[in-house]
Structures are given as structure tokens and as C-alpha cells.
Image (cartoon, helix red, strand yellow):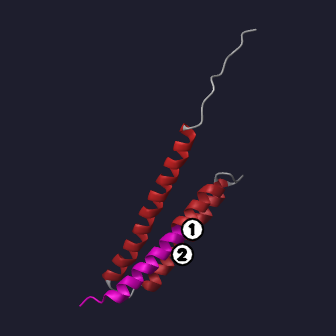
Amino acid sequence: MIDFVPLSMTATVGISMGIIFYGGLYVTVTQGLNSPRPALWFSVSFLLRMCFVLLALYFINDGHWQTIVAFLTGFLVTGAIFQLLKGMQTQVASASLKSVPIKSISVRKQ
């Protein structure tokens, strides 16, 4: 019989790991693009985020496939929410840019 309390707790851990993973990715992209060494930012961030999530999955796993599915479901739902929030942020930014009037540029011949 499937016990839902441990599975919901595992899904909660997956959501937490998703927030840490995708939040770290957001910080890496915003800081790494402005850094003089972006390759270092991206590679170290990737290694840290992957090690953190894989360690959490290792310690959460009790040998049943249901716990892995619950963890990954929480993790992937968090990723989908981050993508939706980023898409909404992009739409708001593009809408605010559309409202700015663009002045025509005149070229003088000398």
C-alpha cells in the first residue's frame, strides 16, 4: 500500500531543491553575464547545483521508485513555475518598452 505522507514530504523536498537549483541558475545567469569570467561562474554554479540536488536525491531515496518520482515531480513542477514567472517578467518588460515612444533619428548631410 502506498503511504502518502512520506511521498508528500519527498515532493516537498523536491520543490525545495527545485527552488535552490533554479534560483541558483537565475543568480548565475544574471551575475555571470556581467562578470569578467563568465565561464567560471557557469561551470562552478553547475557543479554546485548538480552536486547539491544529487546529494539530496541520494539521501531521500529509500530504495522505492515512488520516492524518486515524487522528488522529481516536485523538482520539475518548480522548474515549470520558474519558467512561467520568467515568461511573465519578460512580457511585462516588453510591454513597458512598447509604451516608450521612439523618436525618429534624422541624419544631417554636411
Q: Is residue 94 magenta?
A: no
- Residue 110 x/y as whole percent: 76, 8
Residue at x 49% of width, y 80% of height:
56
The label nearer to you, 2 versus 1, is 2
Left/right placement of residue 62 relative to residue 88 reads left
Q: Amino acid at mark 1?
A: Leu
Residue matched to label 1: 47
Residue 94, percent from left and from top:
53, 43
The main secondary structure of the magenta stretch is helix
Graded by Cα atoms within 10 Å as few (under 14), some (14 to 19) or many (20 or more), the crowding at tag 2 reads: some
**Considering the image in quadrants, where does the N terminus appear?**
bottom left
Q: At 55% across and 69% down in the image, what residue appears? A: 49
Q: Is residue 13 magenta?
A: yes
Q: Quadrant of residue 37?
A: bottom right
Left or right? Give the position of 48 relative to 2. right
Task: Please determine whether, in this image, residue 70 is positioned above or below residue 96.
Answer: below
- For mark 2, give the secondary structure: helix
Left or right: 32, with 5 as reference point: right
The stretch in magenta equals 1-21
In this image, 26 relative to 64: left or right? right
Relative image position of residue 61 (x, y in whole percent): 40, 84
- Residue farthest toward the left in the current orientation of the protein: 1
Which mark is first along the chain, 1 or 2? 1
Q: Quadrant of residue 103?
A: top right
- Looking at numbered disc 2 in the image, what kind of residue is underneath it? Phe
- The CA span between labels 2 and 1 is 8 Å
The reply to whether dot 2 and dot 1 touch (C-beta < 8 Å) is no
Task: Give the percent coordinates (x, y) of residue 24.
Answer: 57, 66
- Numbered disc 1: secondary structure: helix
- Per the image, the residue denoted by label 2 is 52
Determine the residue positioned at 72% across, 9% down: 109
Neighbor class of circle 1 (other Cα within 10 Å; few <14, some 14-19, many 20+) is few
